[in-house]
Amino acid sequence: MTERLRVFLVDDHDVARAGAKHYLEDRYDIVGEADNALDAADMICDREPDIVLLDVHLPGGGGASVVTRVRRTHPDIRFLAFTVSTFRKDVVRLLDAGVDGYITKGTFGPDLPDLVEAAAAGRRPVSPDVAGYLLDIDEQITEAAGIEKLTPREREVVNLIARGYTYRETASRMDISVKTLETHMHHIFDKLGIASRHELSRLAFDTGFVRPDDAGQHRGKPR
């Protein structure tokens, strides 16, 4: 028998959590709930669910901060934004943080389990009313150069390295070890078919992933 997905719910409204739980609990294991960003990050890291159903606006930092904190130590946990917000800035903020889908609470309840499964499988479900933003964001992040293959954490590495930060400075800003950063760089090189940080920087600028004026924000010496 296939193991049931482990789901964690994050929303500051009790009714919203109860509604989601109603549609999900017959099919998935609900392993925890939280109503604020600070508690959510700690509980998610402790309980290690497969996927988190996450509101955008939360006390204590917001949904994006939860994704960022958890992904530092648990990069395989997936997140599905589940919110009333259709504002572009909210969609961009959550997608930049690395959520695996963005659906609105207008979604018909019985469809929710299938959408959770799609996000857990990496298919990035998105509600029609924000899908246009997603296309714009993807085009801005990368054209056809392959940067879209990278994880959100790897794209963060590319952004800092291309702007001139050294390995040590980049690792410090990301709160990881230099050894972990070197592992990220190895994976990035493999995925993009390049062999040096200089090629990586050129690719980042050529595709518009990093703008030329961003380079002036830091002048580091290549490691």
Image (tube, grey):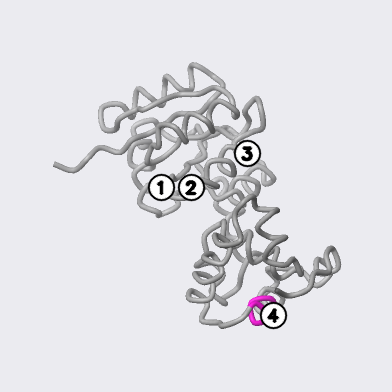
Of the residues under marks 2 and 1, which one precedes in the sequence?
2
Q: How far is mark 2 from mark 1, CA to CA? A: 6 Å
Of the residues under marks 4 and 2, which one precedes in the sequence?
2
Of the residues under marks 2 and 3, which one precedes in the sequence?
3
Q: How far is mark 1 from mark 4, CA to CA? A: 33 Å
- What's the residue type where badge 2 is placed? Gly
Query: According to the image, label 4 marks what residue?
Result: 202
Query: According to the image, label 3 marks what residue?
Result: 65
Position above or below: 100 against 217: above
**The label number, if any, that marks residue 101 in the structure image:** 2
Q: Position of residue 97 (x, y in %)?
A: 60, 48
Q: Nearer the viewer, mark 4 or mark 2?
A: 4
Query: According to the image, label 1 marks what residue?
Result: 119
Disc 2 vs disc 1: Cβ atoms closer than 8 Å? yes
108 vs 179, left or right, is left
Number of other residues with Cα within 10 Å of mark 4, as a class: few under 14, some 14 to 19, many 20 or more: few
SS label for mark 4: helix
- What's the residue type where badge 1 is placed? Ala
What residue span does the magenta drawing correspond to? 197-201
- What's the residue type where badge 3 is placed? Ser
Disc 4 vs disc 3: Cβ atoms closer than 8 Å? no
Q: How far is mark 1 from mark 3, CA to CA? A: 19 Å
Q: How far is mark 4 from mark 3, CA to CA? A: 30 Å
